[in-house]
Amino acid sequence: MVKLPDLELPETPRLTHNITWFARALRKAGLPIGPGRVIDAIRAVEAAGFTSKTDFYHTLAACFISKPEQRIVFAQIFRLYWRDPRYMEHMMSLMLPSVRGVQEEKAAQAAEKRAAEALLDGVDRDLPDMPEEQGGDTQIEIDASATMSREERLKSLDFEQMSNDEVAEAKRIIARMALPVRPLQSRRTRATPRGQIADWRATMRAAMRKGGEVTEFAAKSRTERWPDLVTLCDISGSMSHYSRIVLHFLHSVANAKGAGWARVHAFTFGTRLTNITRHLRTRDVDAALAAAGAEAQDWEGGTRIGACLHEFNRDWSRRVLSRGAVVLVITDGLDRDAPERLAREMERLSLSARRLIWVNPLLRWDGFAPKAAGIAAMLPHVTSFRAGHNIASLEALADALSREDGGGEKARLMKMLHER
């Protein structure tokens, strides 16, 4: 058995304890931090010193952050744990219900709730008893008749601002959701007594059996068929947190009974295109997404929307769009490829699909404008432009599918696009 060398601790053992506790909070919030990184962080602080808070921040960041998307959680936990002298009171205010005044409530920043949950793991969250002279026995009656229920509030909460428990509850709500769609009229017909189309061949055949005398007219009507649904989901670093929840939604749609879709095809893309259709057919959602994650090797990587759409149009378009499918493109539109290529591939995709709906989490901002080159290249070719940042926005997709104009924001944003 190999004996590990002794760890040279800094002069302040309490600082070592705090760094270890800080690393536990990061691991609880989802960062992959093991004992080796904690030891490296302690040694790095020992070498760099503890004189400047800025240097201390970047020293720990260099040891604990391995991907750009982890900076948000790291910054929130660092601010709460190291920078704010009353960070515990601030975290308790995030986790506990309280009676607030009429002032405007500050919305939690991205990943702030997950940071608070990670730091408060194991901490007693019960409010302390108030002395009698401070109103300890005072009973406060609150009329909650006009307040939203927990589920209603959760539906309007941004996925990025959800805590770990809220994400789990949101997934349970999404598992019960469906995406209904109207059937399409087929070119095929069938004989019906009250059909709107005259069936002359059936009429003449009946007349031939009666000596050529026409006694009644046969009628027929068009049959109905259900369309296919094709989804292209962005799994790059900027979309990773949203795409995981959206894939839960797509799994529920693919396995919903009586939803109306003939077939559901699912693809993920980041730096390459991956077909995960067969994985979503697995009944267990955890097993399905685990298999899809193993299939797609470009999770939380870069974004090449134009190249991935080119691969889809070349290899998969004729296979899955031949029946007039509805296409959902789920991405923020931030692309590394040339916008001319992205516009060309989006135009080809829109011509192959019956309807092309773009779901973009960035649309949640009131001041959103199509200023990015990728967004400006994609927008003219979509039928509808929808937000996809919370449960309510996913439910609104049903409304977008039931209306000819899509019910989205495309008209307003196209006007802004021409004015920029």
Image (cartoon, rainbow, N blue to C red):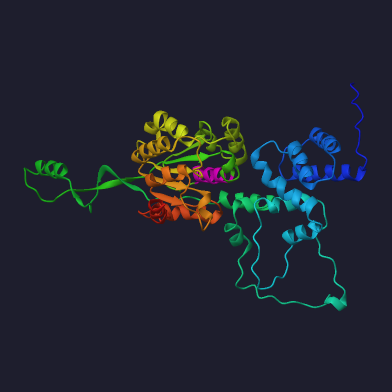
Location of residue 301 in the rendering, given as x and y in whole percent from the top left corner: 59, 35
Please give the count of numbered marks on the rendered protein: 0
Lateral position of residue 375 relative to residue 111, left or right: left
**Looking at the figure, which quarter contains the N terminus?**
top right
Q: Nearer the viewer, residue 166 or 358?
A: 358
Location of residue 5 with respect to 206 vertically, above or below: above
Farthest-out residue, top: 1
The structure residue drawn at horizontal position 42% and vertical position 37%, both measured from the top left corner, is 342
Location of residue 391 in the rendering, given as x and y in whole percent from the top left corner: 55, 54
Location of residue 414 in the rendering, given as x and y in whole percent from the top left corner: 39, 52
The structure residue drawn at horizontal position 80% and vertical position 57%, both measured from the top left corner, is 88
Farthest-out residue, left: 212
Location of residue 110 with respect to 338 vertically, above or below: below
Farthest-out residue, front: 51
Location of residue 132 with respect to 278 vertically, above or below: below
The structure residue drawn at horizontal position 43% and vertical position 45%, both measured from the top left corner, is 376
In reply to whether residue 248 is colored magenta, the answer given is yes
The answer to whether residue 289 is visible is: yes
**Magenta segment main secondary structure:** helix
Lateral position of residue 92 relative to residue 333, left or right: right
The answer to whether residue 120 is visible is: no
Q: Residue 100's image quarter?
A: bottom right
Q: Which of 79 and 278 is in front in this view?
A: 79
Q: Nearer the viewer, residue 176 or 236?
A: 236
Lateral position of residue 76 relative to residue 176, left or right: right
In reply to whether residue 182 is colored magenta, the answer given is no
Range shown magenta: 245-256
Location of residue 150 in the rendering, given as x and y in whole percent from the top left corner: 63, 62
